[in-house]
Amino acid sequence: MKVILLDHDGVICLSNNWGGRTKKWAKYQSENSDGSKEKKDAPVEYRFDDFDSKAIKVFNEIIEETGCEIVVSSDWKLHATLEELGDYYESQGIIKRPIALTPNIQNCTVHGNLFMWSPRWESEQLRTIEIRQYLHNHPEVTHWVSIDDLNMGKIGEPWKDVWAIDNFVLTPKSSEGIKQSGIKEKILNYLKDE
């Protein structure tokens, strides 16, 4: 099975989309003044920023070319169920629903090599542990790539490479994400059959 471990912010939800959820939430509250004031109780479309339409086009092309499945590694998994995220993907124009979420760190037992924890790299280190745990739990995965704006890739430095992951594509420009030149080709390289 081929899998993309997908972050959202900076990958398919780009910086020009950020903050839209605040407007959506205000609209929802004004239209539902007698309802719940908890975001977790609102429909999922009011909880998140929109995905970028051009990024979705590129992402859908990758899905069509590879037949890959989607596993959500984004911290959005903390604010919605798999089913809700699937509904949101469909509403945003993604042609496949995610099949899973990476486990949350408190449920991870696979940490790989012991390494020095760094406050500077905490988000990256946590996410790599969650990805390693998902892959450990799913030996049926034959091809995979993690796409993120957090730099979890190896850089040839022992202090970082001990916890970094191999099959990784960085989207360094938060305004371009997955639609950035050359990103699609890097992703396809990890998902192609040998």
Image: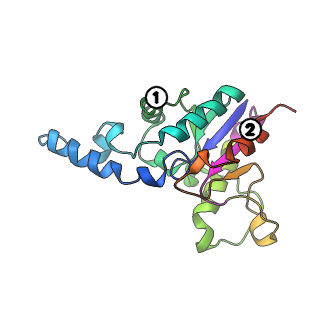
**Chain-order first, disc 2 or disc 1:** 1
- In the image, residue 145 lies in the stretch drawn in magenta: yes
* Residue 42 in picture, x, y percent from top left: 28, 40
* Residue 77 in picture, x, y percent from top left: 48, 45
Classed neighbour count for the residue bearing mark 2: other residues with Cα under 10 Å, few (<14), some (14–19), many (≥20): some
Residue 188's label in the rendered image is 2
- Left/right of residue 24 with respect to residue 85 in the rendered view: left
Q: Quadrant of residue 149?
A: bottom right
Q: Secondary structure at mark 2?
A: helix
Q: Secondary structure at mark 1?
A: helix
Q: Which residue is mark 1?
A: 90
Residue sitting farthest toward the left: 34
User: Camera-side residue: 99 or 55?
Assistant: 55
Residue at the spot 49% in from the left edge and 50% down from the top edge: 14
Numbered marks: total: 2
- Is the residue 153 above or below the residue 191 in the image? below
User: Camera-side residue: 150 or 104?
Assistant: 150
Distance from disc 2 to disc 1, alpha carbons, whole Å, reads 22 Å
Q: Amino acid at mark 1?
A: Glu
- In the image, residue 150 lies in the stretch drawn in magenta: yes
Residue at the spot 65% in from the left edge and 26% down from the top edge: 64
User: Camera-side residue: 96 or 105?
Assistant: 96
* Residue 81 in picture, x, y percent from top left: 44, 38
- Mark whose residue sits in front, 2 or 1: 2
- Left/right of residue 122 with respect to residue 52 in the rendered view: right
Q: Which portion, as a residue range, is magenta? A: 137-151
